[in-house]
Amino acid sequence: MLPTIAWKNDKVLMIDQRKLPGEEVFVECSSYICVAEAIEKMVIRGAPAIGVAAAFGVALGVFGLKKDQGLEQEFDRIYQRLEKTRPTAVNLFWALERMKKVFLANSAEGLSRLKQRLLDEAKNIEREDVEANKMIGYWGKDLFQDGETVLTHCNAGALATAGYGTALGVIRAVFESGKKITVYADETRPFLQGARLTCWELVRENIPVVLITDNMSGYLMKKGEISAVITGADRITRNGDAANKIGTYSVAVLAREHGIPFYIAAPMSTVDFELQDGDQIPIEERSPDEVRKISGLCLTIENVEVRNPAFDVTPAEYISAIITEKGVARPPFKSSLAELRMDLQD
Ligand code: MRU
């Protein structure tokens, strides 16, 4: 399986996603600050993957502590640093909350026991994420017939998770079931997760993939060359609105116009039941240089004004189904997601 992130010898190893597909190099972190910076700088990205990274970051932070005194303040410092890395993907906050619960339940038991408990929890989050993705694949694969051509946007693959992927997990499961499937990968400007990461993942597993630029999908849909769209999500609100990589909304509108199903694949940890609708999701704005430059090369006037929202929100009415590890939610999502959530609590 693809090595997105791993805990090894009291360090966190992450494949450097900024360098793919050209170089397969790993960043090694021995402090939580290093993990926080890796999330900010996109060494690791993708909603579930940054949740796992944050959890390991907390463990690493506490591993760095030497004395039992002032544990709570130290923990808060670690938590707050990791919490402010990226605002949109709710998995980050979900994972931090899980770590906090374990901290609170074990902080009186002494530092060495606490370290072990936190590391165990981070490993649980990692393992459960892979299991959830396999289940998303299991539920999602029956939505696709033999011979489909499926568009995806950004990278919701093994690299964006602890392994296997969400949207690409469904595609992997369809492929593994013996059905023919061809993936159209949007290049996904400005960070090129589709061109660099989705293509890299699929090519190395011999899953047929065709790279297109972000402005080609309407043409291909009109010509009948795309039969379905599937993407991941960074945060889904209780009514089914879904934030994902910038450009997802445009693809969803095009899919609706052409009568093509638009699916979201995401674990239940991506559903934020605290938020009523997508207007409440904080949207990250990233550096203008990500738009002005590619690989350090300036494409435009050096100081031209830029907007760089990293995500957009696809309203629930454009989404045909949300595929989770608990099953497939259909509209109206308010009730279908709530039902799956009850399942989760059983
Ligand atoms: O900015 P990124 O690369 O972290 O954005 C990632 C996405 O938008 C993914 O589609 C989403 O996190 C789902 S990953 C399974």
Image (cartoon, rainbow, N blue to C red):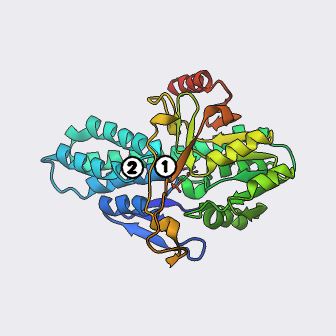
Label 1: which residue?
126
How many C-alpha atoms fall within 10 Å of the one at disc 1: few (<14), some, or many (≥20)? many
Q: Is mark 2 within 8 Å of ligand 1?
A: no
Q: Residue type at mark 1: give it.
A: Glu
The residue under the point 52% across, 23% down is 346
Q: Position of residue 99 (x, y in %)?
A: 35, 42
Furthest residue in direction left, as rendered? 69
Q: Is mark 1 within 8 Å of ligand 1?
A: no
Q: Is residue 241 above or below residue 46?
A: above
Furthest residue in direction bottom, as rendered? 297
Depth check: give the residue in front, 207 or 2: 207
Depth check: give the residue in front, 286 or 302: 302
- What is the C-alpha distance between the residues marked 1 and 2? 9 Å
Can residue 69 be spotted in the picture?
Answer: yes
Q: Quadrant of the N terminus?
A: bottom right
Q: Is residue 69 above or below residue 24?
A: above
Left or right: 195, with 128 as reference point:
right
Depth check: give the residue in front, 62 or 245: 245
How many C-alpha atoms fall within 10 Å of the one at disc 2: few (<14), some, or many (≥20)? many
Q: Position of residue 211 (x, y in %)?
A: 73, 64
The residue under the point 50% across, 57% down is 45
Quarter of the view holding residue 30: bottom left
* Circle nearer the N terminus (1, 2): 2
Depth check: give the residue in front, 44 or 56: 44
Whether tag 1 and tag 2 are in contact, CB under 8 A, the answer is: yes
Can residue 18 be spotted in the picture?
Answer: no
Label 2: which residue?
55
Q: Residue type at mark 2: give it.
A: Ala
The residue under the point 51% across, 49% down is 47
Q: Position of residue 226 (x, y in %)?
A: 81, 50
Q: Is residue 343 above or below residue 318?
A: above
